[in-house]
Amino acid sequence: MNLIESFRVSIRGLANNKMRSALTMLGIIIGVGVVILVVAIGEGATRRVTETVNSLGTNLLTVFAGSSRVRASAATTTSSTSTSSSTSTSTSGGGMTNRMTMDDSNQIAAQFKKTIDAVAPSVNSNVTIRSGNANSTTRVTGTTVDYPYVKSIEVDRGRFFNEAEQEGSRKVCVAGTTIAEKLMGDAHIDLTGQTIAVNGQNFQVVGMQAPKGATSWGQDQDDILIVPITTAMRRILNRRNIDMISVRCTTQDTMPLAQEQMSNFLRVRHHTPPPYPDNDDFKIFSQTDLLQTQQSVTGTMTSLLSAVAVISLVVGGIGIMNIMLVSVTERTREIGIRKAIGATPRDILLQFLIESSILSLIGGLIGIGLGVSGAYLLATVGGWSAIVNMTAVVAAVAVSVGVGLFFGIYPASKAAQLHPIVALRFE
Amino acid sequence: MPPLLSLRDIYKTYVMGDQVVRALDGLSVDIHEGEFVAIMGPSGSGKSTLMHIIGCLDAPTEGSYLIDGVEVADMDDFELAKIRNQKIGFVFQGFNLLARTTALENVELPMLYGHRKDRRARAIRALERVGLGNRLDHRPNELSGGQQQRVAIARAIASEPRLILADEPTGNLASLQSEEIMQIFQELNDEGGTVVMVTHETDIGQHCKRMVHIKDGQVLDDEAVSDRLIAVNVLEEMRQERLRDEQRKAAALAAAGR
């Protein structure tokens, strides 16, 4: 009997027991579907993290003022905190030792020209905004004219504020699209030329930041007002310290050196005693650190869920083996008849192997269908990013057929080895 | 001419627990082409074992068995399957048709395993030969016992094997259907086919040309059938009998009515 005929016989065998065949497939369907879905979600998350971090600039180092250790001790020594908290109210939690200033930032830019391309110091705070009758709150970032270059942001309507406005501490701002939505009810409205009251002071909108969406950790990057740093420090926050410095390195390779240089510079300048980095009053992050952390988190999740999916595939395979064993026993007489009229052991082996492979292949294909549509559903309705990976699809088909073959071997060889007389006498 | 089947000093022993059962004990028999042989004997005589060995379903423990001059006693499973497929057509007591499979597909099955190209045409011809040309698409559960056995005969003869081997072919059938089956076997034999049949019913054996009695795994006696029954005549007699029965009943009814 050739292969095509074996296929026909096997399909007949399965069609004679439709309900059982469908139930047997279920394990494989679920296994393959989950594999596809999980890999799609993992892939989507990884892609999103990478895109977000890339949009921030891969050459970017961020120097935050303050350190977690100091914050922790500040919480216990209430007496000293009360004296200094009035002078510094940092949003990024600088606590009593936030001693980073505009001068630090300027010195860094001036001294390390070989490794550092540009810097943008900034202060951040939450403010109330008002336009007409609409009230809301948002986050204000005070920074310098180099900010768009350092942070790779774009102004698609109007312009960024200029050097003169920065020097003059002018009340101008660049708004994110969420501001337009909060004040006007529509993110597409161009606020350029309008006036917004920030903490009661009128600011003129000179430009709109191009929409950036949310970060991978869920912060809306469009819910922001960007103002000159001098304006923010003197007119809004009344502060002398800055919260962070965004540093754009010349190349990705100079980033470790730049980090080293800045650390040493700040330690000397702030007279920080050793040990380092425990006593540091700053912290330097790179985007690649962030990227790696995020990717390792999503990678762990993906492999964990994939392991669960693979286990369910194996369980599905055992289900197939179980049913095929039942099927062999139930069809012992049929096997006997086939053998008596001339089926070779190989013919019988093939018939049952093909049956189990067809079961798992069809199960696998249905699983792919469900997995892909599930991923699509999550992407469109749930707003998740899910990317169906063709490699995963091909692997899932291969694995499901492999499972069918592997778990089909034992029942099939049991059938093939049945003695015709014994099989014929079986009731 | 050499015999079609030649069994020489065949032994078959089974070990059951600590007891050795000699199902066949040095049996020898020759069957020539065109013969119509009944193998008869009580249960436990070894006739089923002999049947299995002749049918290549089992190999003898010892001895020589030639089909068409080919030694099959020491063939492996694969080669035995080939011989069963090409040289032997089986008819079983329990019909042994595949359920949920049409008559036509059942008849095609052996030729499927035998790679016959013209199997559909042969299968149709065989079914017409046994008078089931109008039942091609019926499944076994839609056919009577006699019809099922005729499908089984069609399956056995479709590939024109050298030997037709029947194991109690009428065991599950009523006498009229049995007679119809025997008629087909007699016709096949008249056309030159070799038929070997295992039975314990003497009147069925009487339809054959030669009777081989087996006892304790050996040939007890081997003789030609003296007063052979011809199925066509027996069927005619049965018909007459039934006619007479009906006439008698009608007469009785008429008498009662008067």
Image (cartoon, coloured by chain):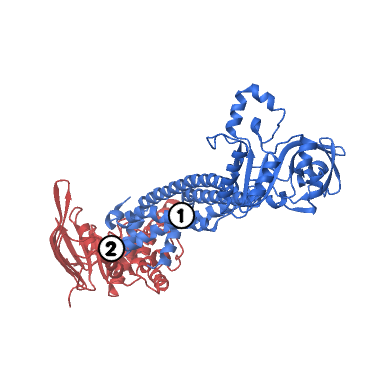
Residue receiving disc 2: B166
Residue type at the position of mark 2: Ala
Tell me which corner region of the image, top left, top right, bottom left or bottom right, holds residue A178.
top right
Residue found at x 36% / y 64%: B150
B78 and B63: which is toward the camera? B78
Along the horizontal axis of the image, is B109 left or right of A29?
A: left
State the hue of chain B: red
**Residue A80 relative to residue A362: left or right:** right
**Label 2 SS:** strand
Where residue A341 appears, as percent x and y from the top left, is: 32, 64
CB within 8 Å, label 2 to label 1: no
- Note the chain letter of the blue one: A
Q: Nearer the viewer, residue A26 or A275?
A: A275
How many marks can you see? Answer: 2
Tell me if residue A168 comes above or below residue A154 in the rendering.
Answer: above
Q: Is residue B64 above or below residue A195?
A: below
Q: Nearer the viewer, residue A126 or B197?
A: A126
What residue is at 77 percent from the left and 39 percent from the top? A232
Q: Nearer the viewer, residue A133 or A399?
A: A133
The reply to the same-chain question for discs 2 and 1 is no
In this orientation, does residue A173 appear?
no
Rendering coords of residue B47 (x, y %)? 20, 58
Q: Amino acid at mark 1?
A: Ser
Picture residue at 29% right of the left edge, 58% below the top: A420
Q: Which mark is residue A400?
A: 1
Dot 2: chain letter: B
